[in-house]
Amino acid sequence: MFQQLDQFHKTRLGYLLFAIAELAITYGFASLSIDRGNLWWYLLALIFLIGSLQNFVRLIGRFSHGEKSHR
C-alpha cells in the first residue's frame, strides 16, 4: 500500500495533491501558532510549508522535463 502511495506521489497529480494538502495543513498550523503563540506550531507550519514548496518545485520539474524523469 505504501509503495502504491509512493508511486502515486511521484506523478504530476500526486505532487499537486500533496502540495495542496500540505498547504492546507500549513494554514491550520499557522492559524494555531498565531492564535496560541506556541513556537512548536510555528515550527510545524514551517516544516509543512517547506514540504509543500518542494512538491511544487518537483511538479514544475515534471512539466519542464517530462513525466519520465524521476528527479
Image: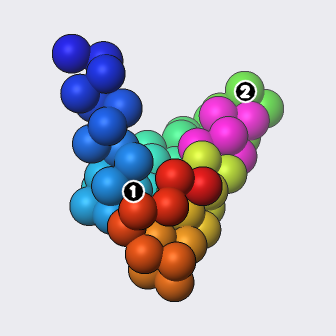
Horizontal and vertical percent position of residue 17: 30, 55
Q: Nearer the viewer, residue 32 or 67?
A: 67
Q: Is residue 9 above or below residue 14?
A: above
What's the residue type where badge 2 is placed?
Answer: Trp
Q: Is residue 28 visible?
A: no
23 left or right of 3 in image: right
Looking at the rendering, the stretch of residues picked out in magenta corresponds to 43-49
Q: How far apart, in angstroms, are the residues tagged by discs 1 and 2?
A: 26 Å
What amino acid is at disc 1? Tyr
Which of discs 1 and 2 lies nearer the camera? The answer is 1
Q: Position of residue 22 (x, y in %)?
A: 45, 48
Question: Is residue 67 at least partly visible in the picture?
Answer: yes
- What SS does tag 2 mark? helix
Name the residue rendered at 52%, 53% in the picture: 70
Which residue is the site of mark 1? 15
Q: Quadrant of the N terminus?
A: top left
Q: Is residue 47 magenta?
A: yes
Frontmost residue, 32 versus 18: 18
Label 2: which residue?
40
Q: Quadrant of residue 37?
A: top right
Going from the N terminus, do you reach mark 1 or mark 2 first?
Answer: 1
Who's the residue at 27% across and 42% down the image? 8
Q: Is residue 21 magenta?
A: no
Q: Position of residue 60 (x, y in %)?
A: 51, 76
Q: Position of residue 53 (x, y in %)?
A: 61, 61
The image quadrant where one finds the C terminus is bottom right
Quick one: 51 or 29, which is closer to the camera? Answer: 51
- The residue lying at 36 percent from left, 32 percent from top is 6
| Farthest-out residue, top | 1
Q: Are marks 1 and 2 in contact (CB under 8 Å)?
A: no
